[in-house]
Image (cartoon, rainbow, N blue to C red):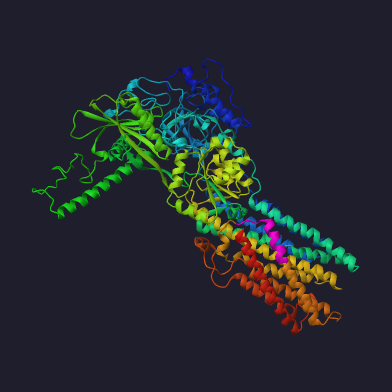
Amino acid sequence: MPETSEAEESGRTAPGPPAPLPSASPAPGGAAVIAGALRELTSLQVLRTLDTGPRGLTDGDAAERLARFGENTLPARRTVSWPGRFLRSLRDPFTAVLLCLGLVSAAVAAWGTACVITVLVVVSCVLRSAGEHRADRSMAGLRDLVATTATVLRRADGEAAPVAREIPVDELVPGDVVRLGPGDLVPADVRLLRANNLSVNQAALTGESAPVVKHPVDAPNRPGDRWTGGAPTDNASAGHGPTHDGLTRNGPTGNGNGPTGHAPTGNGNGPAGGGARWKGHGATGGEAPESGPFDAPQLCFQGSSVMAGSGTAVVVATGARTRFAAAHDSVHPRGPSAFDRSVHGISWILIRFMLLTPPLVLMANAALRGRGLETLPFAVAVAVGLTPEMLPVIVTTCLARGASLLARVHGVIVRRLPALHDLGAVDVLCLDKTGTLTQDRPVVVRALDADGRDDPEVLHWAAVNAWWTLQLADLPVPDALDEAILDADDALGEAILVAHDATDARDTVDGADTADGADTADTADGDDASGHGVPGHGRGAAVPFDYDGIAAVPFDPARRLSTAVVRTPGRLGVHTLVVKGAVENVLERCALDDAERQRLLALAADRADDGLRLLAVATAERPARQRAYTPADERGLTFTGFVALREELVPSAAGALRVLADRGVTVKVLTGDHPGTVARACRDLGLDPGEVCTADGIDRLTDRELAELADRTTVFARCTPEHKARIVTTLRAAGHTTGFLGDGVNDLPALHAADVGICPRDAVDVARESAGVVLAGHGKDLTAIDHAIMAGRHSSVTIATYLRITLSSNLGNVIAMLAAGLLLPFLPMLPAQALVQNLCFDAAQLTFSYDRVAPAALRRPTMLRPRDFLRFITAFGALNAVADLATFAVLALALRGPGGTDDEALFHSGWFTENLLTQALVMVLLRTGRRTAEAPGTSGARGVFGVRGISPVGRAAAALAVTGLLLPLSPLGPPLGMTALPSVYYLLLVVVLGLYAVALAVARRRHENRGARA
């Protein structure tokens, strides 16, 4: 900032009326309005609008504004109490069905049935509430990424000099002047007044993890600078004089307090085609147009963090008026997930059956037997018999067990239990590239000369620039690109050294040494033939610190390059300028004709289209001098070549992508990056990118056209948050179950649009609160997601198995009951007997929660599809009804016809025993947890859920059969209306059960074959 008068310094007596402060109550779009309006004002106008000055507010002003605007906090997070969780669990459709049946049972005085149903409902709700409460406790340990204090300039009332204080972030108000430094979280939405090599990471807001250079846009140019805004780079030319050792310093006051190296993410060194991460640094164009407030260099937003440099800024918005809060508030309520849709569909099937059954029983008995309302308890018992009473308990137990094991073994927190089922049903996983497929850490691929041939000398000069611009910085902060270049140069030097040692050893063996004993490859002073020594290595290729560093002209966003000035030992009187930066900016400073410059730009663009990021390197020799170097010296350069980089791949990503493909999960990459960059990363990982679709293409498509495109397209580039949400919504509308992996505020729309939202532990707080699954490990680990998907499939398969078995068995019993009620002069089963039978069957089925699932059942996404269930239970229910009717014939034959005084008790006993035995057979023969060989790639699921020894379901089925055989003979038989059966009945029953078992096995084989063909 230039020096200002006292009137300008206060910001309150400058000409012109001050604009009013923003309203205290946030309005829809208020954050956007504030950011948009302040973007067009100068710093002085912003200070006048906020009625403040560069010295900040007084304590009295701050207190008044705090009372007016409220604390600088996000909208309060709603915590759900235990009673609230319990009542919310009652809204589950299955639970609602059971409650209705319990009320009907109580209305007809079937108190035993009503009590059992009530207990089951309470147990289910308690289990679900406990599981979600544990997940919330785990989440509470992750809420540690929010700034707690900020450095603010405040003045005591009546004092003129401000004092820098650390105050809680909640106490910040619009008009406060804050200081930002490396590692600080931006505490509110602010407008920069001064900046010194400031770079900010906005990944939480934009999804782009590469930090962005920020600077004031209304600072005037100064002599000797090629600067169009922000902190100038040469204080010597501004009259501040050179600093010690001829080293230039930047910063608006010449105090040398800021680092002089690159911004730590290499924004100024942006390679060609870098796209959104290196905005404006493409090989063929200039500055990219600003696309939104986050691109405004003078604005920093709450939720971002300072990576390097320092700055002074005025707070323009706090609390609910920040962009961070606005992004959270703009998210629409989440629609029904895959689990919700499945549960509602199956519930309505059950409700239709249960509404239809009692009237049929009453009408049939009234018409054929002349019975009236005395059959109502029996009709209710039939309806209860059709209902899977244990379903809420088993669903909650399976999901809670899977969530607990995931948290303990793989560090995956399931915040909402139904989200685990949704994970098992996911067939499309949408994710970003950065942090998931790539590490956002560049690695050098090649060093090319002007003709596109490999040339290690280019990498050497790039390393010289990287090393000395870092060494000559006040606060050395490594740049990601510079680190990659130095690592590559060091690796090259080591390789040359190894090769050289191998040559020496071979030459020694061959007698190739010279007569005087000196190796011909080395000079007398230990330097190699090229004249470049290798300190620390003894010999080999030159390294950056072989040179004497003289000065550095650091990067700035106007020049988009940096310069190191070095002196080669032994060459007195000559300084070498080594320039590295964006391709266009380096080439325009080189002594090239237009044709050659265009050829080099075309070469760079070609490499950029292949997904590489390019830096250009040039050198120049100048006579040695004491005067400081400035950007004006960067002219007449000799072009050296290009350094090509790409982002380093996540080591586990390729294997995880293959495993997900084997699981039947299709991966879609939704990113804001350059199409060539993301396509190359996908190809390197073995994921065929196909034809890359960009945001421009998405905007021109209708929803139907987008659905067709999304089904066959793998990569969507240049996506905004709205594009990501639209793609996810379209995939869901096309029948896919989608998961979305995101970590920033910009990902909130897509996280809400997906069936299940997934985020890492270091995601922003609002993203973690919105996601159904949180990866508590480090980063966006696809392997952890695979474990979570397999856990979800295990739970879903178990739930589906229970539903198929219990509904088909119950439907068969209901059909048999209706037929028997019409054929017999008495009720085929007493209500108490039906209740005991249901309790025994339900208790045995609890073991499904601990059963081992066959690997073949986990190979594909699993989902509870109502139509599939209806077909299954109809077919197998009819088969069960045939077995029951055959039992009636056996009973008639064994008892030699009805009419005896004990015939009713004998019939009840015989059918009770047969029912439990057939249900035990169904549990064993229709379960999915069969002893089959492990399928390739399923060892992870077995490692979490695998159990050894006898199956729990097998033991439960055996206990159920024993109960069916012994209960009529026990002392409990007579009170329940049952008695001992003749021996011949058991012999005939063995025949019936044998035929039923064969029929079940054949029917299951046909069903599995039909499913495999589908």
Instruction: Please tell me which residue lies in front, 577 or 730.
Output: 730
Image quadrant containing the N terminus: top left
Instruction: Give the farthest residue toward the bottom.
Output: 983
910 in magenta: no
Quadrant in the rendering for residue 986 = bottom right
Q: Position of residue 863 (x, y in %)?
A: 63, 56
Is residue 873 rendered magenta in the image? yes
Residue located 18% across and 53% down the image? 506
- Residue at point 60%, 54% (across, down): 425
Q: How far across and down, in percent of the image, does residue 997 sit?
A: 67, 73
**In which quarter of the view is residue 280 placed?**
top left
For the view shown, which residue lies furthest in the top direction? 15
Residue 347 locus on image (x, y percent) = 72, 56
Seen as rendered, the residue at the extreme left is 515
**Residue range of the region highlighted in magenta in the rendering:** 862-877
Choose between 606 and 284: the one closer to the eye.
606
Residue 388 seen from this side: no
Q: 369 above or below 554?
A: below
Left or right: where 499 falls relative to 849: left
Q: Please provide percent x and percent y for residue 567.
A: 23, 32
In the image: residue 269, left or right of residue 388: left
Residue 396 or 256: which is nearer the viewer? 396
What type of secondary structure mainly makes up the magenta span? helix
The mark tally for this picture is 0
Quadrant for the C terminus in the image? bottom right
* Residue farthest to the right, as pictured: 370
In the displayed structure, 990 sits above or below 104; it is below
